Image: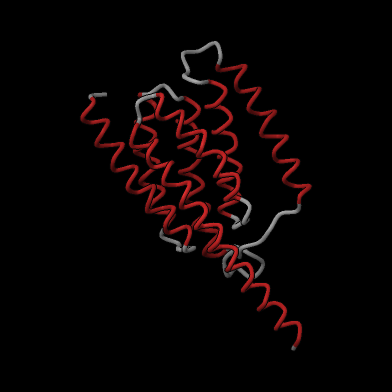
Amino acid sequence: MALIEQLRFEEISVAFAAAYLALAIRQSLWCWPAALISVALWAVVVLDARLYMDVALQVFYFAMAIYGWQQWRRGGARNEGVRVHRWPASWHALVVGLIALASFLFWLVLRGTQAAYPFLDSLTAIASVVTTFMLARKVIENWFYWFVIDAILIYVYFARDLFWFSGLYAVYLVMIVIGFRAWQKSLREEGALSDARLAH
């Protein structure tokens, strides 16, 4: 891909990715259409950078954007949209173990290819699959996972000369903290509302 064309795709994808996260922090449904546009362009750029797991991840993100829209709009027990909630520690222990195992298996497959950073590419891709599902289901701990994933991706993208992507993930680290606090407030408010309902 020509450098100018790559930069154009990268810049537009970054703009929509930033919009996606800003809207997700506010729990706005419109985060998902922004994600659709971002991942389509992102896939083109990372394919050129030979980050093959990242390409597959963008395809997954595209599907999850559709799923996320549906869950936030019509999910939950009453079809009123999912609400912010926590997962028990035992679930997180299982998830982290499965991420580690799957990352190792994908590394075994990719290490014999021309893939750049096969283990880090596998680790961030697998972890992102799980964490995107958590975001779509409004599991508040998704923000902790994203912080670790994005810190790794700053290095990976910078090393592949994808400076816009790397810069975006540096900004993401700040936005993740904001997102966690916003969702934590929402969780507290929902808990207070539930307590008030029980009192009546």
The part of the image, by quadrant, that contains residue 181 is bottom right
Measured as percent of width and height from the top left, residue 169 is found at 43, 41
Work out whether 86 lies above or below 173: below
Left or right of residue 118: residue 38: left
Disc tally is: 0
Residue under the image location 39 percent in, 26 percent down: 47
Residue under the image location 40 percent in, 35 percent down: 166
Q: What is the quadrant of the C terminus in the image?
A: bottom right
Work out whether 23 lies above or below 44: below
Measured as percent of width and height from the top left, residue 157 is found at 41, 30
Outermost residue toward the bottom in this view:
200
The part of the image, by quadrant, that contains residue 30 is bottom left
Left or right of residue 44: residue 57: right
Outermost residue toward the top in this view:
112
Work out whether 182 lies above or below 148: below
Residue under the image location 51 percent in, 64 percent down: 73
Q: What is the quadrant of the N terminus in the image?
A: top left
Outermost residue toward the right in this view:
90
Name the colouring of the figure.
Answer: secondary structure
The one of 177 and 90 positioned closer to us in this rendering: 177
Left or right of residue 158: residue 85: right
Measured as percent of width and height from the top left, residue 52 is found at 47, 25
Outermost residue toward the left in this view:
4
Work out whether 188 lies above or below 38: below
Residue under the image location 39 percent in, 42 percent down: 168
